[in-house]
Amino acid sequence: MRVLIVEDDPLLGAGLKTGLAQDGFAADWVQAAEPALHALRLEHFDVLVLDLGLPRRDGLSLLRELRRAGSILPILILTARDALADKVGGLDAGADDYMVKPFDLDELSARLRALVRRSGGHPAPLLSAGDLTLDLAQRAATLGGQPLTLSPREFALLEVLMTTPDRVVARTRLEASTCGWHGDSEGNSLEVHVHNLRRKLGHGRILTVRGVGYRLVCDPAP
Amino acid sequence: MTSIRRRLLLSLFGLWIIVWAAVALTTLDRSGHEVGELMDAQMAQIARVLREISLTDPQPAENATPQALSAVGHPYESKLSYQRWLGDRLVASFGVAPATPLAATIGFSDQAFGGARWRVFGLPGNAPDEVFYVAQSDTIRKELIHFLTIQALKPILWSLPVSVLLMWLAVGEGLRPLHRLARSIGRRSAERLEPIDGDGVPAEIRPLTAALNALMERLDQALAAERRFAADASHELRTPFAIIRTYAQIARRSGDPAERQAALDNLIRGVDRASRLISQLLMLARLQGEPRATGRGVASLVRAAARVVADRQADAQAAALTLTAAVPDGEPGVVAVPAAALGILIGNLVENGLKYTPPGGWVQVAIGSGRGTVALRVTDSGPGIPAADRERVFDRFYRPPGQTQPGSGLGLAIVRRICDLYGLRIEIRDGADGVGLSVLVIFPEPSSSPKAHPP
């Protein structure tokens, strides 16, 4: 799941990025409204965490512009403004959720997952493809009823593939959705993660579409 | 408890008694005098009547014996007496008069006989050696005077309780505006500190309401400072607390020792930021609550600048910056600002310079004087502040766009507040040769102050 964080405070921005990455998000972070618009124009994000008190251009103005442009991106406002009027104003301007600082990382992650789930038309926190299920809330996977141990990266990769089963997902999208802009901190490439996943799921589950990306097969031929 | 009503009543009553006593004494004196005059005139006329009657018997042969009082008459007749002498012969007498002449002189005199005091009038008769004496007991006069006085004073005495009651009511009525004011103040809530309405308040109470209003205004300012502190603190501390909480959670979850260490370091940074923010907010709140105060102490600007520069050397070295002081020799640069406020002022300016100047640069604190002023100049080789932002940087929590250095946005607000408190002028200018920033603070020299030299 790919999240863009818009937060001007350097220390908090870095913390959000690290914390959300721990929860399996591919998190990217910008410090102002303009870079955020730029990033959103160029790349795909599943959810946006937006601070309101930004330098130069306020978060609300960014939010309004996105909604005016017809964006349906789930947006969570994360701000120090705790007044009821701010909350109402933020939600009415098009935000999907509103959290006041200080916040709990677990709650933030859960809310972001819920937002992505609802926007993707999967209200249940459970993804399934054949005998493969993914519990997004518990971050647990099962294969044929048996629990499956996955690394955060592998889980993120599988999540993207399972959201659109039996369809090809571009490798750039997969890379971004699992690692963000700065790549894998362990230095592993997408191929390595796919290789590991194949090993755990069994061959024939993830197919390579040469030059494009990968495809998850729901019911592989035995 | 002192009571205005009681004091007013007592003083009014005392005055009333004094006036009343003076009136009574005057009445007594005047009526005594008038009664005396009237009675003296009567005695003189009786003597003349007796003399006219005596013409029917100009030369009585026999000596007279005093006549006894008859049954027909008045008890007060015993208070009157007369004699007619022809030479040394008493030829007629009435009343309790003795056998000797009632007086030795002609005209009015006061005599004593028969155990009482008498008023006597002697009138020469028709014959050369004839004398008439008419005497009247003093008791009659005294009784009459007392009677008249008491009759005159009776209504006044009767009116005493009525007067006290009326005075009580009048004083109460006079104090009504005070009670009304007390009730209107009593009904106020602690949140309502607007001034008391001065209209309809008597002139005597106006100094009180004016003093109360002044106090109210000071309280309102202090309360506003407290409220602003609470509001600012609850808002501005949210981000540092979010940082602390986020890194605490990261550290708790992380299995990677390096990541945990980094998170803990950042957590401490967040705590430092929060505590620094709190102390700055408190400082600003205290400065905001204080009324404008000048001349509350003097300090040497040179000494204060030297101390700040010495204190911040370690910070400067850590940031790879050169921090220097350029101060005039042997001149203390005394200014009418207490040393503590001076330290905060210079400290905040130097800290800003150190924070925003890139490594390898410099920050300089310079002091100069001239034309009755002392000037402090803090310059740096940093990026400066665009002219458009120069007024706004003094606003609380204002941070220039694109500012990535951590900061509370309070440092310059505190500097501005100190300048306002002590009547200092502050200007932001371009640095030397248009590079960096120059902050100029101009102090009026406390030359008029008698304690112009620090201890």
Image (cartoon, coloured by chain):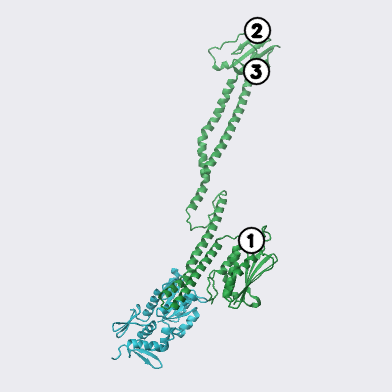
Chain colours: A cyan, B green
Q: Which mark is residue B298?
A: 1
First of labels 3, 1 by sequence position: 3
User: How far separated are the C-alphas under marks 3 and 1?
Assistant: 94 Å
Q: Is residue B169 above or below residue B269?
A: above
Q: Quadrant of residue B291?
A: bottom right
Q: Is residue B378 left or right of residue A107?
A: right
Is residue A170 something that shows in the picture?
Answer: no
Quarter of the rendering occupied by the C terminus of chain B: bottom right
Which image quadrant for residue B410? Answer: bottom right
Residue B216: give x, y in percent of width and height: 53, 56
Label 2 crowd bin: few (<14), some (14–19), many (20+), radius 10 Å: some
Image x and y of residue B441, in percent = 63, 68
Task: Specify the subunit that label 1 lies on.
Answer: B
Q: Is residue B256 left or right of residue B453?
A: left
In the image, residue B68 above or below residue A211: above
Secondary structure category for the residue under label 3: strand
Can residue B147 be seen by looking at this rendering?
yes
From mark 1 to mark 2, how far is it between C-alphas? 116 Å
What amino acid type should be assigned to the residue bearing mark 1?
Val
In contact (CB < 8 Å): disc 3 and disc 2: no
Give the residue pinned by disc 3.
B121
Pick the residue in front: B58 or B224: B224
Residue indicated by mark 2: B60
Q: CA distance from mark 3 to mark 2?
A: 22 Å
Three-letter code, disc 3: Phe
Which chain is disc 2 placed on?
Answer: B
Residue A172: give x, y in percent of width and height: 42, 88
- Asked if residue B2 lies left or right of residue A70, the reply is right
- Between circles 3 and 1, the one closer to the viewer is 1
Q: Is the residue B126 above or below the residue B6 in the image?
A: above
Residue under disc 1 on the same chain as residue under disc 2: yes
Give above or below for B237 relative to A133: above
